[in-house]
Amino acid sequence: MTLKIKKLTQIAILSALGSVMRLSLVAFPNVKPITAFFFVLVIYLGLGTALLVASLTMTLTGLLLGFSVIIFAQIVSYAMILTAGYFLFKHVRQVVLQAILAGILTMCWGFLISLFSARLFGSSIWPFWLSGLPFDVAHAVSTALFFPVLIIIFKQINKGQNNDNFR
């Protein structure tokens, strides 16, 4: 896969933006615009770009917040829900329904991370997942709320850009 300078720059800037978005609300557990940001990237820039930005963002912020094997689980979990979102968003065009779908997929992300973490720590999945459920709900609700805001921002950016920059 050959990436042009323009695309590499776009990915680098979006990864830096994603890192700032994740770090800006670090004091509030799982209340972050980052997952909504990744879903919006899927819609406007495609699955490949969204996966690259998500992977780089998780790696960069992992270096700042603490790097462990869980970063790999986050990247894999994001790949799974972003891929699902890529196919589902093609059939769901209303922003409110897309936001709800993004929230549901974010709950799936929480379950996938819990599954990986329970396995890593040798725990049973159900108590592990249930104990983290309030954080997963906060993550899903914040994703559903940030999603329409980010869609509006990207629509405005899209109006001022050439069609080769955005889908």
Image (spheres, grey):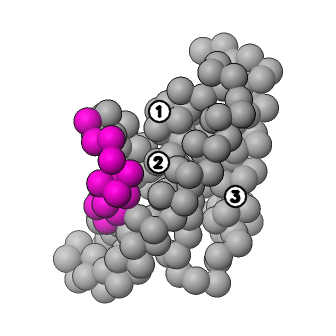
- How busy is the neighbourhood of tag 1: few (under 14 within 10 Å), some, or many (20 plus)? many
For badge 1, the amino acid type reads: Leu
Q: How many marks?
A: 3
Secondary structure beneath disc 3? helix
Return the residue nearer the eye: 12 or 89. Answer: 89
Disc sitting over residue 47 in the figure: 1
Q: Main secondary structure of the magenta part?
A: helix
Q: Is residue 25 visible?
A: yes
Residue for point 65% across, 34% down: 159
Read off the magenta span: 91-108
Up/down of 45 relative to 65, above or below: above
Up/down of 96 relative to 5, above or below: below
Disc sitting over residue 129 in the figure: none
Mark 2 and mark 3: span between their CA atoms?
15 Å
Q: Can you tell which quarter of the image residue 134 is in?
A: bottom left
For badge 2, the amino acid type reads: Phe
Report which residue position mark 3 lands on.
19
Is 103 a magenta residue? yes
Residue for point 64% across, 19% down: 164
Return the residue nearer the eye: 157 or 74. Answer: 157
Residue for point 50% across, 75% down: 30
Report which residue position mark 2 lands on.
39
- The image shows residue 113 at horizontal and vertical percentages of 38, 63
